[in-house]
Image: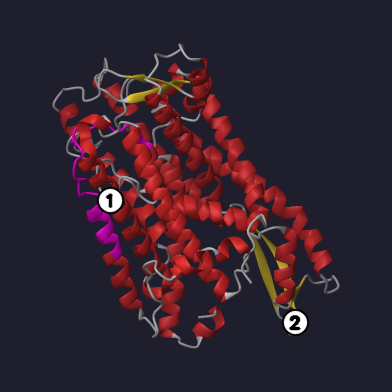
Amino acid sequence: MAGRFLSIFKPIGRILPEIKKPERKVSFNEKIFWTALVLVIFLVMTEIPLYGVAPSANDNFGQLRVIFASNRGTLMELGIGPIVTAGLILQLLVGSGIIKCDMSDPEDRGLFTAASKVFSIALTGIQAIAYILSGMYGSIGELGITVILAILIQLIAAGIIVMLMDELVQKGWGLGSGISLFIMAGVAQSIFWSMFSPVNGLFVGGLSQFLAGADPFNGANAAFTYVFGSANSIYPTLLGFFATIAVFLIVIYLQGVRVELPMSYAGYKGFRSRYPIKLLYVSNLPVIFASALFANVYFFTQLLWNQFGQPAPGTNLFFQIVGDYMRTESGSVVPVGGLAYLVTAPHNIWGVIGAPLQALAYLGILIAFCAGFSLIWLEVGGLGPSKVAKQLMDSGMQIPGYRRSERPIEQILKRYIPIVTVLGGILVGLVAGLSDLLGAFGTGTGILLSVGIIYQYYELLMRERAAEMFPAFRRIIGE
């Protein structure tokens, strides 16, 4: 039964909007249709501007938006950030035992879902208010109460729509997860515009100006800056394009690296199998946690800096520690010191050369947090050796040559899982960090997430097609 905390959400859950599970078998083609429809609606929402927000307003969060599938000044201003944050907080609380919840109990699962919805809506409202207070859309006095309420209502309504679209896909009407779909779409959109934007895209805007003899990147040498960029440039470069391809290939390779432990079925003598332990054992979750943490540090320190009158760099000890900012001539705000500065990657290779300590600090902090979050999620997510050993025992499997018991399985798993978990966390942090420093399109974290999501969709599509062609296969995969 649910704990006291989740029971609070029982009456609230009855009035929350909900997508019902299909009461019939949804065909493969129908799932494709609903998934495509949800994706189209999401992409349309990323282009619909918010009423009351000036189109020329500066975007101070830039590449941080990619992994949260958000777009400046549109209905997708907040993207999936509040939903992901709410889900991660609750999962951590449940996994650590602070909140009692039995996910095998349908009632508990329903209460957990209701709590996630409430937290998502609450965080959407809180983040929307924080954006307004931060001065992103102009001063409170300039906006007026009517415009402020309009912006708040639009953002909360958009957040609820995104939440319901994710629920529609997850409950069996579509394929996979809506959140994963939106992340993949956001990263793909970012990569596409970096390559083909008519204004500053590498292969359209930038290349046409370069061939015409102009320097699209304001450097001393057009060819050199087209390949490597310049110190003040944030535009895509040829180096960033090659880095993007390299990251895709590296992550695809890492997805396939695994250790396979020989297993046998106790009830079927002679029937052998293998239990795979992937190098990316906890997938890309560590880099999601780290990126979300860095984004929140960046956002809230900038909010405080705005609220305290935007003090000049080096004049306030508190901001020198948490995050010192400076407003550029173009009106954008950039970190120049403190923690917010250290968790922000330089834009390109020239940014790394100009600020090597910032680059090293960013890379070191990202790798350390990814390794730490990997170990935390190992226990919180139920992926530790003891829990895996119990699951293998419950499914009737054992290791050949050992007596059928959890202890020998757990001991063998302990030799591999903790090491693979830390190593995988270090690798995803290293790949994401280095690709950010080289200016990869869509950010290193975005590419990591996209490759993982594409791989999951590939497996899901193959399973769905097999189940469609061979109905008896559904019983094997538990559908």
Q: In this view, does 269 lie to the left or right of 174?
A: right
Return the residue found at the far left: 212
Which residue is located at x 50 percent, y 83 percent?
Answer: 474
Q: Which residue is pictured at 19% across the width and 45% down the height?
A: 51
Horizontal and vertical percent for residue 120? Answer: 43, 54
Q: Circle 2 is placed at which residue position?
A: 270
Task: Find numbered disc 2 in the image and state the secondary structure of the residue it sits on.
Answer: loop
The secondary structure type at the circle numbered 1 is helix
Can residue 49 be found in the magenta stretch?
Answer: yes
| In the image, residue 462 above or below residue 281 | below
Q: Is residue 93 above or below residue 263?
A: above
Give the quarter of the image for residue 268: bottom right
Foreground disc of the pair 1, 2: 1
Point out which mark residue 397 bears.
none
User: Label 1 crowding class (10 Å Cα cut-off): few <14, some 14-19, many 20+?
Assistant: some
Which of the 4 image quarters holds residue 102? Answer: bottom right
Q: Which of 369 and 274 is in front in this view?
A: 369
Q: Give the range drawn in magenta.
A: 38-63
* Residue type of the residue flagged with mark 1: Ile
Residue assigned mark 1: 153
Q: Which of marks 1 and 2 is nearer the N terminus?
A: 1
